[in-house]
Amino acid sequence: MRIIHTSDWHLGRQFGPMSLRADQEAFCDWIVELCQDQEAELVVVAGDLFDRAIAPVESIELFRTTVRRLLDQGVMVAAITGNHDGADRVVPHGDLLDLSRFYLRGGYHGVGGVVSIDASDGPLDLVLLPFLDPQAAPDDFGEVTGGGEPLDVDADADTDELVDRRQRRTHRSVLEVACAQASGRLAAPRSLAVAHAFVAGGESSDSERQLVVGGTGEVPVDLFEPFSYTALGHLHRPQTVAGKENVRYSGTPLAYSFSEEHAKSVAVVDMDPEGASTVETIPVDVGRPVRRLTGPIDELLDPARHPDAHNCFVQATLTDRSTVLDAKTRLAEVYPWVVEVRLRAAELSDEASDAPTDVTDLSTIDVTRLFYEAAEGAPPDSAADEVLVGAVTRATAEVDR
Ligand SMILES: [Mn+2]
């Protein structure tokens, strides 16, 4: 069977002040068409369906119509909530939707369960592992002992033990329980796990929100050992984990931060009836890429210099020593999608302020020169130095008077 693995659609997200609505709609059209062209049987969305817990109404509508179009085409859909989603709002009808072959899970309800699917070439066990907030775990949620066995939960456990157990919980410990429970229930010769997690060894971008406050929230890759293929969400860059072809992040369909200059793609997974899979990544050719440009403003304003950045979201870092007026307005004439303008000189002065120099033995003019260098990113040239010397001489003369 052919599975299309995607994640982190983040519907409703903006790029800085720019709306991504048209790009997200274009991606939804694209995925519907891709499934038709590829004759896919199942589409996976591995968490962060929406960008925030209370998603805009038009994003909810876009998700609903996209799933509807896929189901109408005869494609099954499996989706879980991520750390951005409001699980309680997304999934109240979860198991009802199973009837239409839309498998949606979030939060702790039904976690550790297995959904048996009849695919065209045989059965598949689907294990849906949404982002599990350790602090939100029900009190009777188990623990895994050293041997990987879920601990029996004693309903009469005293309060101290419950408090201890709550404090011990980490993203790793709750996911371990869920994986152990699910793997004990596997029945088909093959399985597909869908999880939203930060698996140790993965490479992050600037647009993921930390899974848990404090600690790293990392989980070890061997949690997913029992499953034939693990479709991961959370990290926004497409990648395999720990060199395993069958444990993979699809990455986001669109670039959501300037750290994502890499190409975006979805993973097309062909799985045989025994669970062996081959994977091909298909680049997503809709949506606006991102570009980081660095240089003096005159260089960046030359339209021949970076013609490929014209249609990108642009972050411009200006290296000019002197003040640049109206930089963003001027850059927008060449790069209509410029989002952010940064000043390198300002960055340099930030760096300089990290390393304070002992100025007690320096003359007033030398301290002034140091200040100039920190503010402008370079020592004063002779003309600037003449002005500084003049100003300092006059100021100190006035103080002495
Ligand atoms: Mn995400």
Image (cartoon, helix red, strand yellow):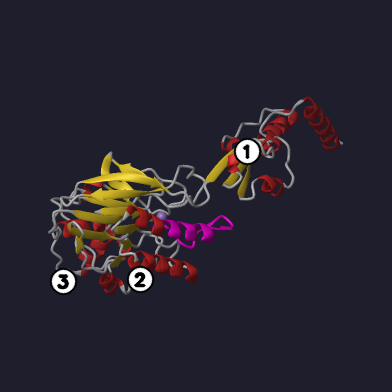
Relative placement, left or right, of 58 versus 391 is left
Q: Position of residue 88 (x, y in %)?
A: 35, 71
At label 1, which amino acid type do we have?
A: Arg
Q: CA distance from mark 2 to mark 1?
A: 44 Å
Label 3: state its secondary structure: loop
The circle on residue 344 is 1
Label 1: state its secondary structure: helix
Q: CA distance from mark 2 to mark 3?
A: 25 Å
Q: Position of residue 160 (x, y in %)?
A: 22, 66
At label 3, which amino acid type do we have?
A: Ala
The circle on residue 88 is 2
Q: For the point 61% across and 42% down, which residue is it?
A: 316
Please tell me whether residue 382 belongs to the stretch shown in magenta: no
Tell whether label 1 touches label 3 (CB within 8 Å): no
- The quadrant holding residue 244 is top left
The circle on residue 155 is 3
